[in-house]
Amino acid sequence: MLSKEKRALEVELREETVFLENYDKIVRAVDERYDVRGSDLSNLVMMYLTQKGTVSNHRRKQYRHMVQEEVFDYIEQVTQNLLGEQRQENQSSH
């Protein structure tokens, strides 16, 4: 039973590590092109990652006075590309 729990913990830690690495990559990519307040960028990147690369129109409206429309599109593009590459890597490794 302990080995099952250990494997589950290892999987969870691996997923969390990948999430944080993705978060850092996306934030860096956006920071290189746009000037977005840190907390807004952090919230948006977390939303995009947890929603598999998209956010609702409601969220876009919620942030539209703080973030340019093209920033939403760029975060979406970067996130979807990154997640797509990882899916392909995972499929080819199985």
Image: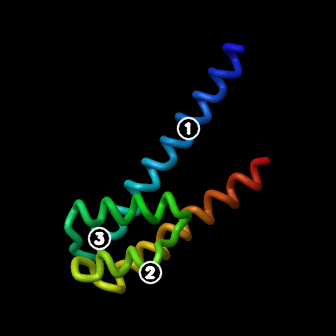
Residue at (56% x, 38% y) in the render: 14
Tag 3: amino acid: Glu
Marks 2/3: CA–CA distance: 25 Å
Q: Quadrant of residue 64?
A: bottom left
User: Element at badge 2?
Assistant: helix
Residue hosting label 1: 14
Of the two numbered discs 2 and 1 in the rendering, the one whose residue sits closer to the viewer: 2
* Mark 2 and mark 3 residues within 8 Å of each other at the beta carbon: no
Tag 2: amino acid: Asn
Residue hosting label 3: 32
Where residue 15 sits in the image (x, y, percent)? Answer: 55, 42
Give the crowd class for mark 2: few <14, some 14-19, many >=20 residues within 10 Å: few
User: Element at badge 1?
Assistant: helix
Where residue 89 sits in the image (x, y, percent)? Answer: 68, 55
User: Element at badge 3?
Assistant: helix
Image quadrant containing the N terminus: top right
Where residue 53 sits in the image (x, y, percent)? Answer: 52, 68
Along the line of sight, which residue is nearer the eye, 66 or 57? 57
Tag 1: amino acid: Arg
**Circle nearer the N terminus (2, 1):** 1
